[in-house]
Image: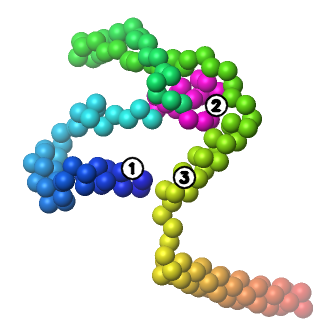
């Protein structure tokens, strides 16, 4: 959801409207795969670097060094090389800086949350109350039938 909002903001910044995007999408062949570099994101590389550092906090992309692995031939004979992030050896941050980083990250996530409005809260509350009533009636009827059946068997 947040990524879609980010893309919409980028389109607005470029001045593109929905009407300008639709013809471009319609002109593209439906079965053609997009260029992998066009949709690539550094999130996976940053996550790998965070795991290598042993810290769940944010890793600055400038701290990463990329190493080229050996090239391997693919099925069609082309050679590919994968860039693997090598984490820079950095000492473990102190407990206070980790707590502050956690709180900053939590606050940033809370800023991205789409909080429901009054109508959505009322609708969700009505659904929950309705489900509780239906479940209560079902369990009450089931209990009544089971107790009548047990009393009939015992007599």
Q: Quadrant of the N terminus?
A: bottom left
Q: Label 3 to label 2, Cα distance in Å?
A: 18 Å
Residue at 54% across, 78% down: 121
The total of numbered circles placed on residues is 3
The residue that label 3 is drawn on is 109
Label the magenta part by its dominant secondary structure.
Answer: helix
The residue that label 1 is drawn on is 3
Q: Residues within 10 Å of mark 1 (few under 14, many from 20)?
A: few
Report which quarter residue 59 is drawn in. Answer: top right
Dot 3 lies on which element?
Answer: helix
Q: Label 3 to label 1, Cα distance in Å?
A: 13 Å
Report which quarter residue 98 is drawn in. Answer: top right
Q: Nearer the viewer, residue 31 or 57?
A: 57
Mark 3 and 2 residues: CB-CB less than 8 Å, in contact? no
Q: Label 2 to label 1, Cα distance in Å?
A: 24 Å
Dot 1 lies on which element?
Answer: helix
Q: Nearer the viewer, residue 26 or 8?
A: 8
The answer, for residue 15, to whether it is visible in the render is: yes
Mark 3 or 1, closer to the camera: 3
- Magenta residue check for 56: yes
Q: Nearer the viewer, residue 94 or 46?
A: 94
Residue at 18% across, 42% down: 31
């Amino acid at each position: 959801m947040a990524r879609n909002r980010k893309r919409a903001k980028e389109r607005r910044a470029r001045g593109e409207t929905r009407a300008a995007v639709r013809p471009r999408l319609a002109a593209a062949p439906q079965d053609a795969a997009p260029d992998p570099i066009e949709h690539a994101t550094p999130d996976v590389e940053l996550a790998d670097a965070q795991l290598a550092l042993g810290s769940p906090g944010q890793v600055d992309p400038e701290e990463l060094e990329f190493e080229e692995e050996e090239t391997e031939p693919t099925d069609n004979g082309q050679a590919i090389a994968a860039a693997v992030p090598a984490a820079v050896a950095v000492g473990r941050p102190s407990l206070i800086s980790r707590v502050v980083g956690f709180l900053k990250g939590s606050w940033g996530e809370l800023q991205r949350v789409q909080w429901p409005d009054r109508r959505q809260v009322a609708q969700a509350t009505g659904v929950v109350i309705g489900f509780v009533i239906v479940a209560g009636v079902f369990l009450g009827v089931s209990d009544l039938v089971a107790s009548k059946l047990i009393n009939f068997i015992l007599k």
